[in-house]
């Protein structure tokens, strides 16, 4: 990633739509390293995303060994990720997130605990920080990894965020994301 893309990613994180956005892409991850674009996903409170590897291979576990529900779903901003990955078709899917959206994901606009309606499902923004993993550094380079982890950028959630499923339901490409009102 060059400096121009880094600056663009920061700008996009700040200027993405607030309060309501759309689902650009959905990715199912049936096994390690496999990222399949799909038209819909079923989000299940107990089991995570139907067909996704989270329940078997979650990197974060509870003391009893069960997968931590705070990392059931990962969301990222499509345009921010394109600054890291490039804009060629399919490149952005290498990030491995489940939901790619055009929504402002910054802490200022989506604090921990915020509930979002996505299609039929409701998710809760997690307190687990997505500060990029080693795979992100391998795929996109040390500069991209450092940009995400920079203390000046952590609140921007350049790498996206994790969420817990609070209401099961189907999510489709093109669905709207917005604050959940009870």
Image: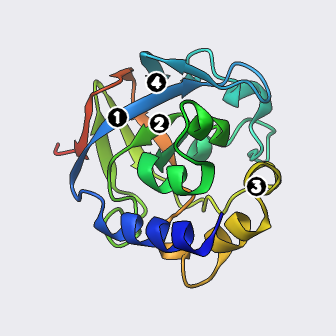
The residue pinned by badge 2 equals 99
The residue pinned by badge 3 equals 133
In three-dimensional space, the C-alpha distance between marks 4 and 2, rounded to whole angstroms, equals 11 Å
In three-dimensional space, the C-alpha distance between marks 1 and 3, rounded to whole angstroms, equals 23 Å
In three-dimensional space, the C-alpha distance between marks 2 and 1, rounded to whole angstroms, equals 7 Å
Dot 4: element? strand
Are there few (<14), some (14-19), or many (20+) residues within 10 Å of tag 3?
Answer: few
Q: Inspect this view and state whether residue 75 appears.
A: yes
Classify 64 as above or below 128: above
Q: Residue furthest left?
A: 181
Q: Earlier in the sequence, mark 1 or mark 3?
A: 1
Mark 2 touching mark 1, by CB under 8 A? Answer: yes
Q: Earlier in the sequence, mark 2 or mark 1?
A: 1
Q: Inspect this view and state whether residue 46 appears.
A: no
In the rendering, which numbered label is found on residue 43?
Answer: 4
In three-dimensional space, the C-alpha distance between marks 3 and 2, rounded to whole angstroms, equals 17 Å
Q: Quadrant of the C terminus?
A: top left
Identify which residue is drawn at 73% across, 54% down. 140
In the rendering, which numbered label is found on residue 23?
Answer: 1
Q: Earlier in the sequence, mark 4 or mark 1?
A: 1
Identify which residue is drawn at 64% across, 79% down. 150
Tell me residue 19's x, y (percent). 21, 55
Classify 117 as above or below 138: above
């Amino acid at each position: 990633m060059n400096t121009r893309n880094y600056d663009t990613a920061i700008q996009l994180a700040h200027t993405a739509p607030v309060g309501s956005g759309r689902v650009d892409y959905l990715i199912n991850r049936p096994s390690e390293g496999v990222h399949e674009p799909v038209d819909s996903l079923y989000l299940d409170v107990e089991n995570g995303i139907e067909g996704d590897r989270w329940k078997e291979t979650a990197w974060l576990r509870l003391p009893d060994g069960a997968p931590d529900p705070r990392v059931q779903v990962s969301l990222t901003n499509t345009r921010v990720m394109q600054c890291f990955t490039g804009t060629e078709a399919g490149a952005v899917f290498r990030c491995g997130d489940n939901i790619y959206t055009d929504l402002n994901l910054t802490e200022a606009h989506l604090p921990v605990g915020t509930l979002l309606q996505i299609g039929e499902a409701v998710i809760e923004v997690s307190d687990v920080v997505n500060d990029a993993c080693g795979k992100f550094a391998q795929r996109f380079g040390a500069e991209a990894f450092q940009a995400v982890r920079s203390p000046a950028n952590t609140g921007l959630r350049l790498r996206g965020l994790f969420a817990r499923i609070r209401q099961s339901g189907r999510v489709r490409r093109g669905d709207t994301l917005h604050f959940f009102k009870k």
